[in-house]
Every structure is written in C-alpha cells, then in structure tokens.
Amino acid sequence: MDGEWLLTGAEWEAMALSLRVAAWCVAATLPLGVGLGWLLARRRFPGRTVVEALVQLPMVMPPVLVGYLLILLLGREGWLGAWLDAWFGVRVAFTMWAAVIASAVVSLPLVVRSVRLAVEAVDVKLEEASRVCGASPMDVLLSVTLPAAWPGVLMGMLLAFVRSLGEFGATIMFAGNIAGQTRTLPLALFRAMETPGGSSAVARLAIAAVALSVLAVVASECLNRRALASRGAG
C-alpha cells in the first residue's frame, strides 16, 4: 500500500524532464523578456502598441492554438522548420526543444510584464545622473536599472519557471506526449488520467506537481526578500 505513493521510474523521468524544460524556458525567456520589458518601459516609438499586443498575445490565445501555430512555423513542413530541416538537418517539433519553445512562448508575456513594471518603478533621475557622469546606455542598464529592478526580474523568472511546469496545451500540440522525450509532468498526469486504474498515478503526479510549485514559490520569496534587503542596505 505504501508503495503506491512512491513515484515510479517513468514518473521521476517526467519530473526531471519538467525541471529541465522549465530551466531552459527561464534561460530562453530572460534575455528577451528583459530587453522587451525595458524597451516598453523606457522608449516611445512608432508601432509600440503593435509590439505590446504581439508580446501579450500568447497569454490570451488558447494554448492549443499557440502549439498549432508553432507547428506551422517550426514543424517539419513549416515555414521555418522545412528550411532548418533541409539545410541543417535540424528537426524541432516533437523533441524536448519543442517543449522548451512552447513553454517559452507562453511564458514570455509574464516575464515582459514583470520586468516592465519593475523598470517603470525605477527612478529615471538615477539613470539620468549616471548618463551625466558619462555612463553608456548599456552601463546604465546593467549598473543602475537592472539592479534596482531586480525583484521584478526575479518575479518574472519565477513566473516563467512555474508557468513552464504547468504548461500543457501548446506542449502536447507541438512536442507531443512521447515518454522519455517530451512527456513532462502535466502530460504524464494527462496520460495517467486516461489510463484505466490510473487513480494512484494521478494522485502521485498531482502531489509531485504541487510540491514543485510550492518549492519554486518559497525559493523565489526567499530570494526576493534577500534582494529587497540588500537593496535597502545599499
């Protein structure tokens, strides 16, 4: 009876894959999210409203539709996927990287929004003072803006990580549900729910998913408090 609550090898594999995909998702979305967040917070340019709409679009679109559009773009016969396959022999769809891309696309709006709000809260006078002292725009960004906006950047990273852990619709469309390759925790949970007599597996996977999310939130809160404390001390 006690053994029913222990994760099987395949379930551990799904959890490990979820963590790997989430980590790559954060790595992929952070540079772009910081760049777009800063751009939307500090610059006014023609077409800004269009950029804002495009950035936020994956957050309001059905995830399954996001996955379908990714297939059209990066599938083996997609607009970009066919070219990658023909010239480089690279196939993206139905691989772990497809799961990473799907998670990154749906997570990016959350990162951009968090970074944008954090940058908007930074006192512009601090940036102007740095420029007067001869700092380049990149120096201002790295030494003034981002350190001051660090709690918001951290929150964006957390949101991307947790969103990736729970991503389902876009992933199952673009990456499939392949054991050992693309079957993340939510997909393993879906598979268990479809399997007759899989109630114990559903319970185990549900507990594992909740535990991972709680740990991510607690870790983020600890880091966020440390960042705020160091900022106050400075």
Image (spheres, rainbow, N blue to C red):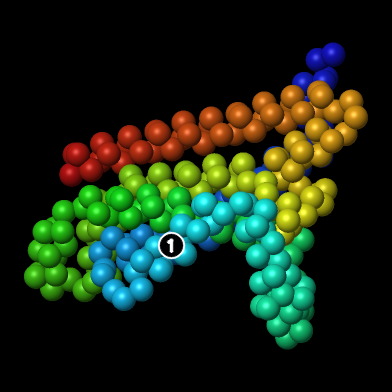
Q: Is residue 35 left or right of residue 4?
A: left
Quadrant for the N terminus in the image? top right
Q: Is residue 95 left or right of residue 226?
A: right
* Position in image of residue 210 (x %, y %): 61, 29
In this rendering, the answer to whether 72 lies above or below 16 is below
In this rendering, the answer to whether 5 lies above or below 126 is above
Report which quarter residue 76 is drawn in.
Answer: bottom right
The furthest residue to the right? 196
* Position in image of residue 190 (x %, y %): 77, 38
Q: Is residue 208 left or right of residue 122?
A: right
Taking the spot 51% from the left edge, 48% from the top edge, the residue there is 160
Taking the spot 51% from the left edge, 52% from the top edge, the residue there is 59
The furthest residue to the bottom? 87
The answer, for residue 218, to whether it is visible in the render is yes
Taking the spot 23% from the left edge, 43% from the top edge, the residue there is 231
The answer, for residue 31, to whether it is visible in the render is no
Mark 1 burial class by Cα count in 10 Å: few <14, some 14-19, many 20+: few
Taking the spot 37% from the left edge, 49% from the top edge, the residue there is 114
Report which quarter residue 41 is drawn in.
Answer: bottom left
| Residue beneath disc 1 | 53
Disc 1 secondary structure class: helix
For the residue pair 182 and 80, the one nearer the viewer reads as 80
Quadrant for the C terminus in the image? top left
User: Residue flagged by tag 1: what amino acid is it?
Assistant: Ala
* Position in image of residue 9 (x %, y %): 82, 37
In this rendering, the answer to whether 199 lies above or below 138 is above
In this rendering, the answer to whether 229 lies above or below 85 is above
For the residue pair 18 and 81, the one nearer the viewer reads as 81
